[in-house]
Image (cartoon, rainbow, N blue to C red):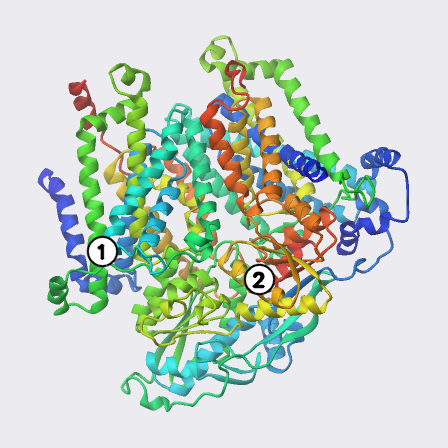
Amino acid sequence: MRASHQECRFPDEKGRAVQRKRLPRIAAALAALLLTAACGGDKQPTVAAPKGDRVFITFGGLPPEELKGKGADFVAAYKAKFGSTPEGYAIYGYVAAQVAIDALRRTGRADREALRVAVSETEQIDGPLGSWRFTTDGDTTLTTMSGNTVRDGKFAFVTVLGGGAAAGSGARAKTDLATIGDPAAPKTGPVKFVSSLPLTGSASAQSGTIVNGIRLALEETGGKIGDFSVAYESWDDASAKKGDWDPEVEAQNADRAAKDPSIHFYLGTYNSGAAKIAMPILNQANLVMISPANTYTGLTKPGLGEPNEPAVYRPTGKVNYHRVVPADDIQGKVGAEWMKAMGAKRVYVLDDRGLYGKGIADVFVATAEELGLTVVGREGTDPKAQEYRSLMTKIKTANPDFVYFGGTTQTNAGQISKDMVAVGLDAKLMLPDGCFEQAFISAAGL
Amino acid sequence: MLTLAQQLWIGLTNGMVFALIALGYTMVYGILELINFAHGDLFMLASFLALTLVGLLGLATASGPVVVVGLLGVVLACAIFAALINRTVDRVVYRPLRNAPKLAPLVSAIGVSFVFQNLGLFWGGLPLDVMGGGLAAAAPKSFPDLIPSTNLLGDGAAFRITAKDLVVIGSSLCVMVALWLFVTRSRLGKAMRATAQNPLAARLMGIDVDRVISATFLIGGALAGFAAVIYGLYVNTIKFQDGYQNGLYAFTAAVLGGIGNIPGAVVGGLVIGIVRALSDQYIGAQWQQAVVFGMLIALLVFRPQGLLGANVREKV
Amino acid sequence: MSPALRRHAPLVLVALLVLYPLLPFLDWAVTAIFGVRLQLDRQIINVMIFAILALALNLQVGYAGLLQLGIAAFFAIGAYTTGILTVDKYPFQLGFAGALLCAPVVAGLFGLLLGAPTIRLRGDYLAIVTLGFGEMTRVVILNLENITDGPRGLNPIPEPVLPDWLRDGLDRFLPADRIDLAAIHWIVLAALVGLLILMKNLERSRAGRALVALREDELVSGCMGIDPARTKLTAFAGGAAIAGLAGALYATNLRTTAEPNTYDFSYSIMVLCCLIIGGLGSLRGVVLGALVLLSFDNLVSPLLTRALQEQLGHDSTSVFANFANWRWLIFGGALILMMRFRPGGLWPARKREVDPATKADA
């Protein structure tokens, strides 16, 4: 099905062989329509991707197939347990849980302050994602990104992007964990992990795979970490009345976790907007928060978001928020560099007007201009729009050789990819990691 | 200039789809004065059926004639499916509320819309190939490109007309003309118009009003089913939230044209399609909704009965 | 229930709510009984804010009979007015009290602005105008980044603080987080109770009866000397202002305006559903509706999801294995059944009380 599908997508290539006059051509097409309206009608022998690769996706870290060592073990274990290939984000759920487990092992006490310090001093050597630690702002030092494309209905790895040390990545002094916090904190008993992710609505596939990743990590401990018994609850931060993550519910989840003394790790959120709400609440409770998916820069990096960020999320001044994914400043930048390396000159930048999409597009534009790419247009899209033919027609007149879309599968990246073809816009498309999921490929019909 | 023409063409094609959905709204409104909120979601369910059938029949890889026959079958199946569901919902949900205050059926319709949306979400989670294996239930689903989108004017031509556009416009026009003939010429159509004008008088004249209402729901549903297939073929993506946005625009189209007025719904649909396209070109894609609704409000302030709403007495 | 108890029940309830922040053991008791933390403290505030919003819509739909499908717009305007007037990005920094006064005024002005030209439109046309306005407002807020910070939302919005003497007094026997809670809890409660009293009086006043008369029969009431357009417009703007107040409280409670997409069409529809479930035009009903709706969303649904997860356990990616994904089905079904079997809502308005009064007035 997919092979012939692709032929339909690029029909203009093969049309060239037959040069007919226009009017008879319309008439012939109309007549042919009634009989042989489908692409099946003018089937050609399989030509793999006639135009070469057209869609490029950046992703923080390597795609599941490219993972080596423990990463590959994770993929195998995930497949064995859940019967499906993990989506890109699953491994971050897994690693986030590992970080928490490791911190609990090292501390040996269920004390929030000690655990916070232990998490911030995490150092994974040859873990599933390679070797990395947290910066003093709670960011991962991993800056390795991958550039991927889509071939034969699957993501295909193209190149490693970025890499190198992140700011503030120098080794950190280790604190003696025994001296921190309440020495009388319990050393046995139940310890609860919770995650707060949007399980309803459009992002549920991504968050589901993250939950699976967390489950896998916790089950590998056999339910016991030291003398602690592990419990895990997966909370939903979406509501029926919003159909997506709901600020009220996220605030409520954070508050519930903050006030429940048996909860020691808050794994979440998925949406950076939700993190903005949960962070100050959890910070005041000194509860560790590890996000497997937030990439908005302002959450951790001073000077890259609003002037009052990230201080505004840390009312106590302590850093309790950590994320295991590289943030948008890295991704937007390597995206622009990759595009430049592929020989692009003119780029049209779109975003979905979301916190994530717009943030990453902003970084992309800044880097692209630095690198000497011409940004021929910058616009927002309506993620609920049915289709984008008009917009693509407009973009066509600007004649870019690349379109960058800051957005996700859910905000219609698939449709954008399709409508570029539908209006005959002969440009390539680059997308950020929000589209790095099988669902994007099926949505785009690639 | 060419760009303008191109945008008008795109707008016209899109507008046809809105018009088809708007017809369902306007017909039901004409008879029952009910804003059938579930109509957009009925359309969405039909589009899921269409995709399922296309997948089961293997049309994506079939040869030309098979696709044509297959598509006709899919259109028929979707139209019947949507028509029957629409009528059943009317029977079970709306009919007991005929004498209730106006808000009651409206709220029921909202309820039905929720139920449909949820069913659409589940449908997307079925383990079918066309649903992406059902792994990501909520994700958009790709509808195979069964009609070529080759430019009929030649590859390098500055203006773009595709076979797909012509199929959308041509088939929609046929359906609209057929509907118009049915409403103005047939016995049942006349009964519909009579009921719309005055249900009580119509009943006194011996018209079986319940039957007329059932017929209206059947026809409105069939139009939604037809529109769903056309939409799938044209846009090539369906989502379980599609009912919301399309319903909103179609409902706006119906009001714009003068709700209850059949030609009005078509005109309204086309206007919305065109305004959308022009706003994307000249104002900016992120303002699309604001422009569409702003125009609607402005229009209603100056022409409260809608574009074609003057002939209230002929509404259906 | 004896009549005396019935008469005093609301007072008892309000007294309980006033005392609630001072009684932390209530939460412990609830936790002990249900075995899970229900977070009553947050729930109560959320329900009260939602109830205020629902009362705003009730004024427009329930009393005046104006089908309004864009209440979220005024809610958003209230929230963003609060944001603009309080965050440190702007020079105003009026603080909580100033914002609370300004938000309803601004939202009310927008209500007037929208209502003045459109209030004469027939019912369903007005519905679509308000719907369109709701979506427009959301898009405009989202796109006017220089003012609203676009998708980031405005934050942090300052928390209300209690006067020092009260704070010091409470400090002796309450934990700190409980005192912060008390401030917002009491303010929201005061707004809600004040509004309920206002509405109760409105029901019995000349203006309120004029509204109801208009809703029932515009022609007749016009003949009785009621100016339909003016009366409707007042109700519309009033409702908008109250929604603005709810928005101000919402943003203050969350300490951010959240994303503009929070205030979309589905939110408006939910508020309408809340009215319908509780009882259109019935004050008690509206409050009950807010309670039922939010409890379903925030309490029952997470509990059931947890139960389902424990039963089914493993694969979280299946769409069926998550109770959260059944919510629309249940909610939609409930709406349909309500309309069929209990169209007046769970706690309908008592018609009899109104009718003789209206007659006497006429």
Mark 2 in CB contact with mark 1 (< 8 angstroms):
no
- Closest to the observer: C55 or C72? C72
Q: Which residue is mark 1?
A: C185
Q: Is residue C32 visible?
A: yes
- Closest to the observer: A14 or B2? B2
What chain is tagged by disc 2? A
Q: Is residue B131 visible?
A: no
Quadrant that contains the C terminus of chain B: top right
Q: Is residue A310 left or right of residue A77?
A: left
Q: Amino acid at mark 1?
A: His
Residue at the spot x=29%, y=64% of the render? C35
Quarter occupied by residue A316: bottom left
Q: Position of residue B275 (x, y in %)?
A: 59, 35
Relative to B202, does residue A356 appear above or below in the rendering?
below
Residue at the spot x=27%, y=39% of the render? C285
Q: Is residue C37 left or right of residue A204?
A: left
Q: Which residue is mark 2?
A: A434
Crowdedness of circle 2 by 10 Å Cα count: few (<14), some, many (20+)?
many
Q: Position of residue A216 (x, y in %)?
A: 52, 74
